[in-house]
Image (cartoon, rainbow, N blue to C red):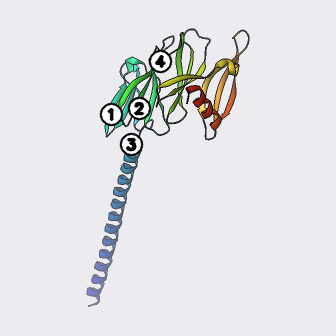
């Protein structure tokens, strides 16, 4: 009788152990499935948000080691600019609905500025050769906001020029205007950074012989800069 009771106890203990392991395994599998679902939802959300570099927008090497611009939309990839057109790295608007790029972007070649609209799925040249002042070329793009695109244009030929003048393009009214001349800043504008409450410019200042230079910073208040844009663009 005692032996029979002992056997029952052992069987019961083994049953509890097996049940516990099964429940633990089930919980683990359930957690893994939930994590996988969460990751997928995050990825889907990012894609739904619009244009995000390295998520829905890719600037990557293709054939012949040339960089191309690819956009992923609705799970499908589309080449926006092929490598043999030599596009520059795209600049994405704050609302993630538009991207702009220079093509071709090569030494001593005057490229044009193109804009891809994510919602309309359109890609077109917005600043063409006829819009660009003589002997100048677009060198760098930066979005001021969802509407205004800032374009640095400098000398297209020669190795001395590192920047240039700052232009603004209105994507709503399709108008471009000179915003800040390099001479106003005593040097060439080489970069534009849009911060929360200010716009900062990097200015390349050369010595008299153009053999050495230093980079200085010029800062504008956000509202001050916007007022300047509206004044120059004619609003």
Q: Upstream in the sequence, badge 2 or badge 4? A: 2
| Label placed on residue 105 | 4
Rounded to the nearest angstrom, the CA distance separating label 3 from label 4 is 28 Å
Q: Nearer the viewer, mark 3 or mark 2?
A: 3
The quarter of the picture where the C terminus appears is top right
Element class at badge 1? strand
Q: Is residue 163 shown to the viewer in this render?
A: no
Element class at badge 4? loop
Q: Residue at x 30, y 84 (%)?
A: 6
Element class at badge 3? helix
- Counting from the top left corner in percent of width and height, residue 139 is at 54, 20
Q: Upstream in the sequence, badge 3 or badge 4? A: 3
Residue marked by disc 1: 77
- Circles 2 and 1 in contact, beta carbons < 8 Å: yes
User: Considering depth in this image, is 173 or 107 the residue closer to the camera?
Assistant: 173
Q: Which residue ends up furthest to the bottom in the rendered image?
A: 1
Rounded to the nearest angstrom, the CA distance separating label 2 from label 1 is 10 Å
Q: Upstream in the sequence, badge 2 or badge 1? A: 2
């Amino acid at each position: 009788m005692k032996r029979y009771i002992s056997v029952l106890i052992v069987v019961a203990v083994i049953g509890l152990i097996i049940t516990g392991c099964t429940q633990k395994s089930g919980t683990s599998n359930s957690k893994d499935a939930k994590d996988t679902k969460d990751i997928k939802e995050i990825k889907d959300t990012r894609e739904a948000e619009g244009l995000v570099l390295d998520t829905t927008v890719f600037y990557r090497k293709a054939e012949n080691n040339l960089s191309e611009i690819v956009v992923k939309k609705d799970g499908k990839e589309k080449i926006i600019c092929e490598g043999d057109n030599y596009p520059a790295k795209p600049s994405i608007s704050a609302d993630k609905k538009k991207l702009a790029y220079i093509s071709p972007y090569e030494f001593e070649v005057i490229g044009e500025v193109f804009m891809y609209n994510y919602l309309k799925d359109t890609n077109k040249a917005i600043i063409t050769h006829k819009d660009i002042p003589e002997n100048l070329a677009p060198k760098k793009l930066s979005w001021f906001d969802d509407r205004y695109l800032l374009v640095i244009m400098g000398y297209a030929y020669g190795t001395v020029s590192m920047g240039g003048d700052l232009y603004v393009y209105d994507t709503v009214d399709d108008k471009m205007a000179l915003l800040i001349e390099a001479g106003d800043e005593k040097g060439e504008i080489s970069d534009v950074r849009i911060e929360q409450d200010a716009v900062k410019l990097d200015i390349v200042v050369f010595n008299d012989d153009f053999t050495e230079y230093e980079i200085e910073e010029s800062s504008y208040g956000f509202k001050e800069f916007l007022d300047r844009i509206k004044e120059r663009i004619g609003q």
